[in-house]
Image (cartoon, grey):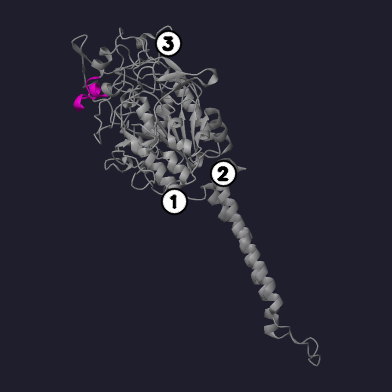
C-alpha cells in the first residue's frame, strides 16, 4: 500500500510490464533447465562387477547434482531480486531521467494580479525598488498633481484598473512603467466585475489602489509555496492585453481573428473586442453563448490529440466578468455572465477552436468536479488546465483570501493523491489587472510581452526556495509540455501539419527561458506540503507599509 499511495497510474503500468518481463525470464530459465535435464545422455548401466561401495565416477556425480542446483540458484536469485528491481522503479515513476519524470502537468490560471502586487517584497526577487527601507519609485498622480508611492494594502478586496490593450500601452509608457495611476483615473470604471451594490474600491470616484502590494500577511500560502518550491520573478503575460487574448495564448500561442474555418484565413488580433450586440443569450442552464469568434488557427490540443496525449480543460461552473468594452459596462464594472463547460467564454475559449471540434475533443472540456475525482484517484490526464469562477479568481473585486483558499485546495488535492510524485503544477495569473509592476516587458513581436504576473512552480522535483530570474511567459509552459510529451514538437506552421499565418513560433523565441531549470530531477521526490485553507497571517515584509 505504501507504493500504491505514492506513485501514479503510469508507474504501476510500468511496474506490471516489468514484472511480466521478469517472470517471462524465469519461465524461460525453467524451460531451459527441464530441456537440459531431458536432453542429457543417459548414464551407462552400472557395472556390477565393480566392488560394492566404490566411489561414483567424478563426472557422473557432477552432472547429476551441479546443473539443477546451479539453475535453481539462478531462479531463486531472480525471484528475490524482483522486489529490489521493480519497487524502486515504481517509487520513482519508472523513469528518473530528466523531464520525463513528470507525467502530469497542471496549469492553474488565476486572474488579474501583477508580480509586484503579490511578490514585490519577496526576498531575493526582482521586486519594488527600495533603498534603506524606503521605496524609490513614485508615480505621477494627475488628480493630486503629485506622485504616489507603493504601499502595503491590507484589504483582501481590491479594485485594480482596466487592463485592455490600450491600458497596457499607458501603463508601460514606453518602458517607464509609470502610467498605472494615470490610467486608473482616466477610465469610466476600474475593470472590476460589477456587483450590486457596487464595491467601493471599484468606483472611479475613489482613490486608486493600483500601487498597493500584498505580502505574507494577506497571502501566506502563496509565500509559503515560494519558500518551499520555485518563484518565477520574470514571468510576463504573453500578450499586452486583457483576459481573452491571454487565455488564447495559453492554449495556442497566438491571438487572431479568422473569417473561415481554414487556418489560412486568420489574421493577428491582440484586442479581441467583440462588436456591440455580438452576444446571444440562450435559455436554460447553458447560460450565455458569447460569440467569441471563429478560432481556426492551431492550438496545443491538436498536437496532444495527434500524439494521443491525454488532456482536460477544467472549468469551474459559475460566473465570470464580461470585461470586453461592450456598452453594457457601467461605472461599477463589467457585467457578470454565466460560465460553464459548454459556454465559450473569455476564460474558456477552447470550445470555439475548430480543431477541437474536428478532433471530437469537446468532451475534454470538463467541469472542475471531475478534476478533484481524477486527482484523488490517480487518473489525472497528462495535461490539465484549470480556470476558476469569478468568486475564486482573484479578479477584482473577488477576495484574494477566498482565491487563495480555492488554489490551496486544488494543490492539496494533488498532493494527497497518487500522482503527486509525477506532477508539475504551474500556478500563474492571466494578466496584470492594472496593478503596478516595475519591470518593463521585453518586446518580442507586435503582441507582447505584457506586464509581469506572479508565477509559482510546485512539484516533488521542484528546487526548494529557488527564485528563477529567467525571462519567461506562458509560452514557456507550453514549451515544457511539448518537450515532455511531444518530443519537442512545436506549434510551428512549417512542421505541425496544420499551417496558419502566425507571426512567429513563440516557443522558439531566443530570450525565452526553460522551465525545466526549475527542477532537480536527480533529487528524490519531495514530500507534499499540505497547507490550511484559511491560514493565520504571516510576518510583515520590509519596508513596512
In the displayed orientation, state which residue is furthest to the bottom: 49
Tell whether label 2 touches label 1 (CB within 8 Å).
no
Q: Which residues are magenta?
A: 168-179
Residue at 64 percent across and 67 percent down: it is: 29
SS at mark 2?
helix
In this picture, residue 232 sits left or right of residue 139: right
Q: Is residue 16 above or below residue 505?
A: below
User: Residue 195 — which label?
Assistant: 3
Q: Is residue 387 above or below residue 510?
A: above
The tag earlier along the polypeptide, 2 or 3, is: 2
Give the crowd class for mark 2: few <14, some 14-19, many >=20 residues within 10 Å.
some
SS at mark 3?
loop
Is residue 58 in the magenta section?
Answer: no
Estimate the x, y position of residue 242 in percent, counting from the top left: 34, 24
Residue at 31 percent across and 8 percent down: it is: 206
Cα–Cα span, label 1 and label 2: 18 Å
Cα–Cα span, label 2 and label 3: 44 Å
Q: Which quadrant is home to the C terminus?
A: top left
Q: Which quadrant is home to the N terminus?
A: top right
Is residue 174 in the magenta section?
Answer: yes
Give the crowd class for mark 3: few <14, some 14-19, many >=20 residues within 10 Å.
some
Of 366 and 531, the residue lying toward us: 366
In the image, which is nearer the foreground, mark 2 or mark 3? 3
User: Residue 9 — which label?
Assistant: 2
Q: Is residue 309 above or below residue 81?
A: above
The tag earlier along the polypeptide, 1 or 2, is: 2
> Residue tagged by mark 1?
97
Amino acid at each position: 500500500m505504501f507504493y500504491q499511495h505514492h506513485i501514479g497510474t503510469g508507474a504501476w503500468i510500468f511496474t506490471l510490464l516489468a514484472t511480466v518481463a521478469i517472470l517471462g525470464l524465469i519461465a524461460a530459465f525453467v524451460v531451459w533447465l527441464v530441456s537440459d535435464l531431458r536432453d542429457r545422455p543417459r548414464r551407462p548401466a552400472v557395472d556390477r562387477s565393480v566392488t560394492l561401495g566404490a566411489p561414483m565416477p567424478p563426472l557422473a556425480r557432477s552432472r547429476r547434482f551441479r546443473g539443477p542446483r546451479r539453475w535453481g540458484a539462478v531462479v531463486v536469485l531472480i525471484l528475490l531480486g524482483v522486489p529490489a528491481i521493480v519497487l524502486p522503479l515504481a517509487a520513482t515513476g519508472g523513469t528518473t531521467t530528466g523531464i520525463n519524470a513528470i507525467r502530469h502537468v497542471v496549469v492553474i490560471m488565476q486572474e488579474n494580479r501583477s508580480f509586484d502586487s503579490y511578490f514585490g517584497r519577496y526576498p531575493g526577487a526582482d521586486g519594488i525598488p527600495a533603498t534603506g527601507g524606503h521605496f524609490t519609485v513614485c508615480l505621477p498622480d494627475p488628480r493630486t498633481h503629485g506622485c504616489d508611492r507603493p504601499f502595503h494594502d491590507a484589504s483582501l478586496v481590491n479594485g485594480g484598473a482596466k487592463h485592455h490593450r490600450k491600458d497596457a500601452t499607458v501603463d508601460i509608457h514606453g518602458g517607464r512603467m509609470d502610467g498605472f495611476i494615470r490610467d486608473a483615473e482616466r477610465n469610466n470604471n476600474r475593470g472590476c466585475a460589477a456587483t450590486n451594490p457596487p464595491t467601493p474600491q471599484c468606483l472611479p470616484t475613489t482613490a486608486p489602489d493600483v500601487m498597493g502590494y500584498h505580502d505574507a500577511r494577506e497571502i501566506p500560502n502563496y509565500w509559503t509555496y515560494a519558500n518551499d518550491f520555485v518563484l518565477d520573478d520574470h514571468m510576463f503575460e504573453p500578450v499586452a492585453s486583457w483576459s481573452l487574448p491571454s487565455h488564447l495564448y495559453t492554449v495556442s500561442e497566438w491571438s487572431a481573428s479568422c473569417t473561415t474555418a481554414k487556418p489560412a484565413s486568420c489574421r493577428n488580433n491582440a484586442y479581441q473586442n467583440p462588436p456591440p450586440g455580438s452576444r446571444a443569450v440562450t435559455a436554460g442552464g447553458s447560460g450565455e453563448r458569447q460569440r467569441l469568434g471563429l478560432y481556426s488557427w492551431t492550438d496545443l490540443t491538436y498536437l496532444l490529440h495527434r500524439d494521443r496525449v491525454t488532456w482536460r480543460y477544467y472549468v469551474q461552473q459559475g460566473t465570470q466578468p464580461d470585461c470586453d468594452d461592450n456598452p453594457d459596462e457601467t461605472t461599477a464594472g463589467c457585467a457578470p455572465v454565466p460560465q460553464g463547460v459548454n459556454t465559450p467564454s473569455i476564460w474558456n475559449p477552447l470550445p470555439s477552436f475548430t480543431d477541437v471540434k474536428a478532433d471530437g475533443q469537446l468532451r475534454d472540456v470538463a467541469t472542475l468536479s471531475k478534476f478533484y475525482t481524477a486527482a484523488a484517484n490517480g487518473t489525472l490526464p497528462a495535461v490539465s488546465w484549470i480556470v476558476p469562477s469569478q468568486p475564486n479568481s482573484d479578479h477584482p473585486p473577488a477576495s484574494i483570501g477566498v482565491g487563495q483558499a480555492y488554489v490551496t485546495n486544488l494543490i492539496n488535492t494533488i498532493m494527497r493523491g497518487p500522482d503527486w510524485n509525477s506532477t508539475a503544477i504551474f500556478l500563474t495569473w492571466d494578466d496584470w489587472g492594472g496593478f503596478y509592476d516595475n519591470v518593463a516587458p521585453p518586446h518580442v513581436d507586435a503582441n507582447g510581452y505584457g506586464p509581469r504576473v506572479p508565477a509559482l512552480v510546485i512539484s516533488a522535483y521542484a528546487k526548494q526556495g529557488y527564485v528563477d530570474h529567467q525571462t519567461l511567459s506562458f509560452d514557456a509552459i507550453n514549451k515544457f509540455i511539448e518537450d515532455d510529451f511531444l518530443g519537442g514538437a512545436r506549434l510551428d506552421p512549417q512542421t505541425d501539419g496544420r499551417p496558419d499565418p502566425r507571426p512567429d513560433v513563440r516557443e522558439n523565441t531566443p530570450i525565452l527561458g526553460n522551465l525545466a531549470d526549475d527542477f532537480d530531477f536527480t533529487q528524490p521526490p519531495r514530500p507534499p506540503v499540505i497547507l490550511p485553507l484559511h491560514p493565520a497571517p504571516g510576518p510583515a515584509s520590509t519596508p513596512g507599509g
